[in-house]
Amino acid sequence: MIGRHYLRTTIRALGPDEPPTRITIAGLSYERVHVFNHDFFAATALYEGGCGKIVLKLGRRVRFLGLPTAWMGRLSIRHEARMYELLDGIPGIPRFTGRWGDHGFAHEFIEGHELAKGERVNDAFFDRLSALIDELHRRDVAYVDLEKRENVLVGDDGRPYLIDFQISFHVRPSRGGRTWPARLLLRVLKDADRYHLLKHFRRQRPDLITAEQYMASRNPPLSISWHRRLFRPFTRARRKALKEIHRND
C-alpha cells in the first residue's frame, strides 16, 4: 500500500523540495519571498531583487508512482514561456522576464489580487478584459483557462490582467497552424473563452450586462457541455483525493 507521506511528496511538482531561495535571471539576482502554489504540475513563487518583484514558475521534475514525469514539466514550461514571449507587450499580460534552466521561467509580478467571487469591479473592467481576450484571439491564441476566476487579476490600478497560460492554445503556421483542424479547434476554444468571459461578467457585474450578453452567458457552447459531462467526475474525484491527503498531513 502506498504511504501517505510518499503521496504527499510525489504529488508535488518538486517533490519534498521547495522553489530555490535565490535565483539569477538575465544576470539579475532575486530572493524568494513567498510560495504561492505547489501542486502536481508546477510550483510558483514570488521573488524580489534585481529589477523589483518577479514570479518564478517551475515545472514538474519528480517521478510519480515510479513513472518519469519530468518531460511533462519541461514541455509545459516551454509552452507557457513561449506564450508569454508571444504575447509580451500586450497591456494586461505580465512582462516576460526570462527562462530559468529547462524547467522554469519568470514574469513580472502584478500588484493586485485575484478576482474574488461577487467582487464589484469598476465599470470599465470587463470592457478591458474583453478587449484583452480579443487581442489574444487576433494573434491566434485561445486562452482556454478563463473558467478559473483566480486566473484573472484585479490590478491595484483597477485594470484586468491574465496569468497562467499553461494550457493556452496556439499553433505556429509553420507547424500546421493554418490547417483546417487547427483553425477549427482554435475557433471552438475562442468560443469557450467568450462564454467564460460573459459568465464572469454576469456574476460580477449583473447591473451592466445586456440582455443579449446575459442569454449568451447562460448557453454554454456544445464543447463545454461535453467537457463537463466527461471530465467533471474525474475532477471531483481528484479534488477529493487531494483533500484527503492534505487533511491527514
Image (cartoon, rainbow, N blue to C red):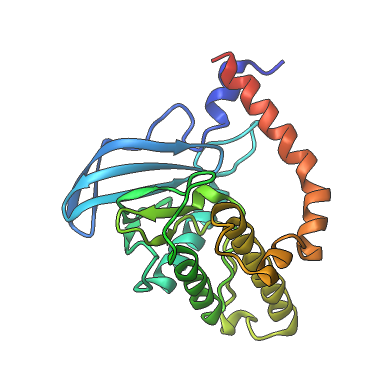
Q: In which quarter of the image is the N terminus?
A: top right
Q: Residue furthest front?
A: 207
Q: Residue 66: name its quadrant.
A: top right
- Along the horizontal axis of the image, is 107 left or right of 4? left
Q: Reply above or below: 184 against 213.
A: below
The residue at the point 39 percent across, 65 percent down is 93
In this figure, what is the number of numbered marks?
0
Q: Residue at x 78, y 55 (%)?
A: 227
* Residue 7 in which image quadrant: top right
Front-most of residues 90 and 64:
90
Residue 162 lies, with reference to residue 49, above or below; the image says below
Percent x, y for residue 238?
Answer: 69, 34
The x, y position of residue 154, in whole percent, is: 40, 54
Q: Is 228 on the left or on the right of 146, as rendered?
A: right
Closer to the camera in the image, 166 or 59: 166
The residue lying toward the viewer, choosing from 199 and 99, is 199
> Residue 188 in the image: x percent, y percent?
72, 71
Vertical comparison of 106 with 180: above or below: above
Q: The C terminus appears in which quarter of the rendering? A: top right
Question: Looking at this view, is 112 or 55 the one in front?
Answer: 112
**Residue at the location (68% across, 64% down)?**
214
- The x, y position of residue 213, in whole percent, is 66, 69
